[in-house]
Image (cartoon, coloured by chain):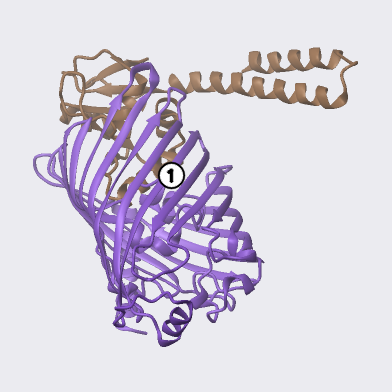
Amino acid sequence: MRAAIHTAVLFARRAGKRTAAPLGRRALLLCVSCLLGFCVWLGAARADEARAFQIIVHVENPLSVAERELLADAFLKRASRWPDGEAIAPVDQKFGAPVRAQFSNVVLKRSVAAVRSYWQQRIFSGRGVPPPEVESDAAAVRYVKQHRGGVGYVSSHADTRDVKVLTLR
Amino acid sequence: MNFWGSSIRVLSGGILGLTWVHAAHGQNLELENNASVETHGFVSQGYIKSTDNNYLGPSERGSFEFTEAGINFTYSTNENLRIGLQIFAHDLGSLGNYSPQFDWYYIDYLFWDWLGLRAGRTKLPFGLYNEFSDIDSARVPVLLPQSVYPVTSRESLLAQTGVELYGQAPLGPAGSLEYRIYGGTIFLSPDNVSASFRDFTVPYLMGGRLMWMLPLEGLSLGASIQRLRLDFDYTPTPEEIAAYQMAGALPPDFAGTLDVRVPFWLWVASAEYQAGDLLVAAEYTESRAELQSTLAVPCTRVVAKGAYGSASYRVLPWLSPGVYFSAHVPDPCGRTGPAKHQYDAALTLRFDLNEHWLFKVEGHYMNGTAQLDPALNDDAPLNTLTSSWGVLLLKTTAYF
């Protein structure tokens, strides 16, 4: 994050040194700099979020790496089966859980509220129902352990001895 | 208050109670063998006030005739088979009148991710939001842009009874495609029957939608097309008969009633971008209709056009502002002055009071009268109504 701010400040200073540039152009450069800095900061923040949760599956799941796109499709119920043909059984954590927000931003690339709107659309137009929600990391682990095609996410400090942790790619 | 009015109040009360219960205990009933029954519902009450012109109801004096309630049940036996139904009732001015109806019901079987089959009464995938136009909790605006999703066409454009094929296919680095193809008919509600227009039927309806999810996360482009034919009997009033006779428009064998057929073509081009809490969308639509009857009228082929651009952003967990600009341009035949268009600039604030309850405030600045209903405005010609006017909408929805 510091690097991001530094980059933005450096960019802005360089822009500022070009005193011959009209005020409008300098302001534009400053805005672009801030935008670039914000994007870099956002990327860094998202990278931090990626480390704040773990993806868990049933111990018999043959995968060791989880593709982000497959996970997103599984949790939005756009994909129904794992590559080995097993039915995917995703489980969400409760609305408002910090780990859900992190998972949603990193894997689904949408906020929890946007995902909720997506499910409201599906529910009330008869297009489907969301994954079940559980109250805690322990409940998510329990659900995944009980379902052969189960997949969930838990916080980085959760006890995952009964399930398999996948690397997110 | 009529029987249905009382019924919907009971239904609304029940849904409010269920909202409270489900907020506390959840709504998923797990059965054996991974089967489950899910129950969801919503109830909304709105208020409409316009500065001039009656819009969607008696809005000039302020109207609470803006109520919706629905409850649905979905039974999933396994990951492939699903059965569901939704009961819905609404009141919007002269529409709905609290009459409960099966909004949708279906049996759905997913063979593979790229092929599923649904049969029953299903919502029509037309544009980005047609299927969701009743679902207040799933969007920021109170009214969707009326140039593409006219609320007064709810009865005829929202759902069909028939079959649908659907699926999704990955395209590798090019993203993925989602398709929907459907065919069937629409059973129009008897509420639509008036003294002059009767026996509405839709002999056929078919269409499809293709959505391309591009590699840029959150960006999707779509195209929807629909073909249908509307048949009905038209019994002109004595005044209309006199006018037609003056113009020489009546057929020689006229016996009081005319058979009318109106084939329609409708299409929409759509673009949507969603990133985090930002949602930007734009759509363009055209509808073409051809009046087929023995009545010799000047406008037998009509083309209506509509477009909008919208954006919304959740700035706080409980606050989402949204804006859109919508333009509706009907066929110019027979229209003059402000009746030739309706432009609509809207600003909405959505407040999420908690996980199951929201409140919205929405203001519209309108220019033009093309989408106003003469019946709500003392049967005045549309070009004589106030051309620049405003609308305020308030709406609250509880849902689970």
- Residue lying furthest right: A20
Q: Quick check: can you spot residue B288? A: yes
Q: Position of residue B240 (x, y in %)?
A: 44, 82
**Quadrant of the image occupied by residue B250:** bottom left
In the rendered image of this protein, does residue B332 appear above or below residue A23? Answer: below
Q: Residue furthest left?
A: B33
User: From where the camera sits, is residue B40 visible?
Assistant: no
Q: B92 or B242, which lies in front? A: B242
In percent of width and height, residue B351 lies at 53, 54
Pinpoint the chain carrying mark 1.
B
The residue under the point 42% across, 61% down is B300
Q: Colour of chain B?
A: purple
Looking at the rendered structure, the secondary structure element under dot 1 is strand
Decide which of B69, B224 is in the foreground and name it: B224
Q: Is residue A166 left or right of residue A18?
A: left
Q: Is residue B363 left or right of residue B11?
A: right
**Where, by quadrant of the figure, is residue B399 drawn?**
bottom left
Quarter of the image with the N terminus of chain A is top right
Looking at numbered disc 1 in the image, what kind of residue is underneath it? Val
Residue shown at 28%/53% (left/top)?
Answer: B25
Front residue of this view, candidates B48 and B268: B268
Q: Which residue is mark 1?
A: B268
Nearer to me, A122 or B248:
B248
Q: Position of residue B322 (x, y in %)?
A: 57, 48
Q: Colour of chain A?
A: brown
Quadrant for the C terminus of chain A, please. Answer: top left
